[in-house]
Image (cartoon, grey):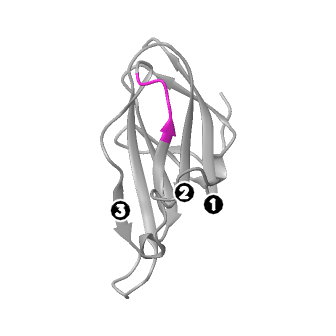
Amino acid sequence: MLFGAHSMSASGVRRLTIADAQRTIDLREGERLEVTLSGNPTTGYSWELDSVDESILRSLGKPRYAASSGATGSGGEFIFAFEAKAPGKTELRLVYCRPWEKGTKPAESFAVTVLCAAP
């Protein structure tokens, strides 16, 4: 298993940040994965799920957003949650973009390879 800045919380959730981009992450079926990425929706940009094989790694809904302060225009963190569903390999790719700007390159991207094994 390759280790980066990601960690396993006491609740058994694997947590990743931008520092983990381009790494390979090992999960067991049933384990949860959380990806936290900085962003500022007041700029019109947001992090979105770009690609993942949901038969292997299932999204647990829309990302949560947590503001870093109550100040107008301040940034915060987008938090994505996933669950390992079945053995296999998939790329998880998230992009930071303005959803209405079709055909433009994302301002940032985050991708990891997820290897899911049986429990």
Query: Is residue 59 found left or right of 113 in the rendered image?
Result: left
Instruction: Tell me the kind of residue under disc 1.
Output: Ala
Q: Are marks 2 and 3 in contact (CB under 8 Å)?
A: no
Disc 2 versus disc 3: distance between alpha carbons? 13 Å
Mark 1 or mark 2: whose residue is earlier in sequence? 2
- Counting the numbered discs, the total is 3
- Left or right of 109 in this view: 55: left
Q: Residue furthest bottom?
A: 71
Q: Which residue is mark 1?
A: 107
| SS at circle 3 | strand
Question: Which quadrant of the figure has residue 55?
Answer: top left
For the residue pair 33 and 100, the one nearer the viewer reads as 100
Task: Using the numbered discs, state the Cα–Cα distance from disc 3 to disc 1 in whole angstroms.
Answer: 18 Å
Q: Which residues are magenta?
A: 50-54
Disc 2 crowd rating (10 Å Cα; few below 14, some 14-19, many 20+) is: many
Which one is closest to the eye, mark 2 or mark 3?
2
Give yes or no for residue 52 being in the magenta stretch: yes
Q: Are marks 1 and 2 in contact (CB under 8 Å)?
A: yes
Q: Is residue 3 left or right of residue 11?
A: right
The residue carrying mark 3 is 65
Residue 82 drawn in magenta: no
> x%, y% of residue 84?
41, 25
- Main secondary structure along the magenta-highlighted residues: loop
Q: Is residue 92 above or below residue 57?
A: below
Identity, as a three-letter code, of the amino acid under mark 3: Tyr
Give the quarter of the figure containing the C terminus. Answer: top left
Q: Which of the two residues, 2 or 77, is positioned nearer the viewer here?
A: 77
Quarter the N terminus occupies: top right
Tell me the number on the disc at residue 96: 2
In three-dimensional space, the C-alpha distance between marks 1 and 2, rounded to whole angstroms, equals: 6 Å
In the image, what residue occupies the spot 31% across and 37% down?
60
Secondary element under disc 2, as helix, strand or loop, is: strand
